[in-house]
Amino acid sequence: MYLTPEAAASFLEVHPEIKRVDVYIIDLNGFFRGKRISARQLISAASSGVRLPLSIFASDITGNTVEETGLGLDTGDMDYACRPLADSLAISPWDPTLALAQLDMLNPQGESAFADPMTQLEIMLERFQKKGLQVDAGIELEFYLLDQDRSFPRGAISGRQQLTSQVYGLKELDDSAPFFDAAEVALQSLGIEAEAVSSEAAPGQYEITLHHHRDISRLCRDVSLVKRTLRNLAPAHGLLTTFMAKPFADLSGNGLHLHVSLVDEKGAGIFKDDDGPNPLLANAIGGVLDTLAEAMLANAPHGNSYRRFLPNAYAPVTASWGRDNRSVAIRIPNDGDARFEHRVASTDTNPYMVAAAVLAGALHGLDTKAELPPAATGNTYRQQQHDYLPAGWDTAIDVWSAAEILPKYFDPQFMHLYSVLKRAEYNTYLAQIPPVDFDWYFEA
């Protein structure tokens, strides 16, 4: 539902402190792009929209337009109308004079632009609705909290620097309490409920668990807002955050874990899991496994993303599933909930991309009654019976480009756009000369 001029005027009347509004789109890389307008322009934005070019979705990680996508100068770099989403209007928790509103870009026919990952997710949700099903999902995201010089943080309470990996350590949470207290208040002001925070497998690494949501598109927005909020709050505490997949070569990477269940029209879960898993859960997981390789580029979109996939690093390297096993790609938790956990994605990705790809796999599984291979047990890093996922960025781009299943669910134009964008990023990345080249080869 779009924001109406009347609702915009009411919001500004209730919040006279608002001076500016960030109207934004989340691009293919998960970056916020848009305009900062004056508060009085919010009403006109709700009435007639905001004009932004489709080439926003051709922006690479550095912000340059990839002309090979055909969305830039080939179209004259034309503007599209963008309408603010009503439920996205909120006050920024890092600046009380700034409001935030997400935009839906519309093509000349008045339809949501194909290039927006949010549109692709909505395509998946519509297909579930036609089956009389609704998605219920939750997300866990990992990140590093560091000092401003990128070193491991010193505790706000003890003053001691974190130098060891204290998984589930409560002392680490005590030492970071001022930051997380501020983060909790900030996220609550945005309507985002964080169920838990925990210390993870490296110094300064944490995980935030977001509450399950039956509006997965809203959940994806929440993930994006969590990242932006934490980045903006950290400097006031002498800190910075990074959601980079692998910021330290010898330490744990940052993963994004998506938990998915399905409910019918009566609100009952269809994945009721006894000793099975039940046939529908088995079909859904089987379909996700069938598409894991094709979807690797959605789950690991950057060059650095692939540094996370190492043996015994809690990032899956095979298309495997199991019960309460954290070495697999798809895990069924043994906690009474009928759901599956997708563990492939890194936190540097666009959450809309991850959700759309996972749901496309689940749809494929339900449509074809995909078979579920035997469950993996023990350490899958030491086993050879599972198919390996693409281990490099270039391979993942090739597999996405040649996909046979995903184009049945994603818009084929979008599939092409994403592959062209990522191929251009890969070529630019490969053209850089890293310091190690000079260290190893300068005198060769």
Image: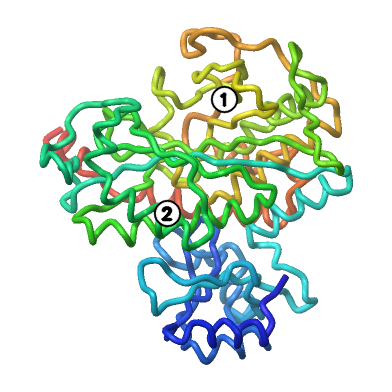
Residue type at mark 2 is Lys
Q: Residue at x 74, y 35 (%)?
A: 362
Q: Closest to the observer: 27 or 405?
A: 27
Residue type at mark 1 is Ala
Residue 366 % position (x, y) = 83, 32
Which residue does the numbered mark 1 point to in the structure image? 329
Residue 92 % position (x, y) = 43, 69
Q: Quadrant of residue 173?
A: top left
Residue 264 % position (x, y) = 84, 39
Q: Residue at x 65, y 22 (%)?
A: 336
Whether residue 327 sits left or right of residue 360 in the image: it is: left
Whether residue 28 is visible, yes or no, is yes
Dot placed on the residue nearer the N-terminal end, 2 or 1: 2
Q: Closest to the observer: 305 or 25?
A: 25
Whether residue 293 sits left or right of residue 94 in the image: it is: right
- Crowd tier of the residue under label 1, counting other residues whose Cα lies within 10 Å: few below 14, some 14–19, many 20 or above: many
Q: Closest to the observer: 81 or 256?
A: 256
**Labelled disc at residue 227:** 2
Residue 439 % position (x, y) = 15, 37
In this rendering, which labeled residue sits more in front, label 2 or label 1? Answer: 2
When the figure is inspected, residue 351 is found, relative to residue 258, above or below; the finding is: below
Q: Quadrant of residue 387?
A: top right
When the figure is inspected, residue 125 is found, relative to residue 27, above or below; the finding is: above
| Image quadrant occupied by the C terminus | top left
| Image quadrant occupied by the N terminus | bottom right
